Image (cartoon, grey):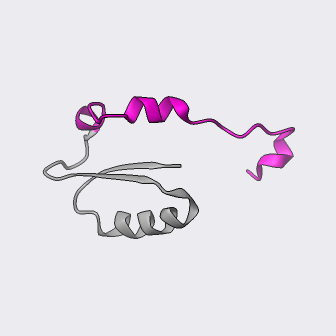
Amino acid sequence: MAWVLYPVPTEILQELYSCMNIAGLPIYTEYPGFKHNIWSKAYNEPGLFEWLFEQRRRAYKNAKDNNL
């Protein structure tokens, strides 16, 4: 799952969000009036830290399994 945090304008990001939505229901939050530094707003987003600490990486048996 992904949480998309982005200032506006967001035309390109909305297209990306649509593609991500097919893969797993991302959370999408826009911040009107901000140019780049949205973290002060994002850190106050209800549920952000709970969501963040619920995320887990898939365990790989070896480096070849991760397709990097």
Give residue 39's position: percent from left, percent from top.
29, 36
Q: Please state if 7 lies on the left or on the right of 4 as rendered.
A: left
Q: Which residue is drawn at 38% across and 35% down?
A: 48
Q: Provide residue 18's location: percent of width, then percent of height.
A: 44, 68
Residue at the image point whose x is 17% and y is 48% from the top: 34
Question: How many marks are shown on the rendered structure?
Answer: 0
Residue 4 x %, y %: 39, 51
Q: Is 25 in the magenta?
A: no
Lateral position of residue 23 relative to residue 16, left or right: right
Q: Is residue 62 magenta?
A: yes
- Which residue corresponds to the image point at 54% horizontal and 32% vertical from the top-left? 54
Q: Tell me: residue 37, above or below residue 20.
A: above
Give residue 56's quadrant in the image.
Answer: top right
Q: Which one is nearer the viewer's eye here, 58 or 33?
A: 58
Q: Is residue 67 above or below residue 50?
A: below
User: Residue shown at 49%/57% (left/top)?
Assistant: 25
Above or below, comparing residue 45 to residue 3 in the picture: above
Highlighted magenta segment, given as a residue range: 39-68
Given residues 11 and 58, the one toward you in this image is 58
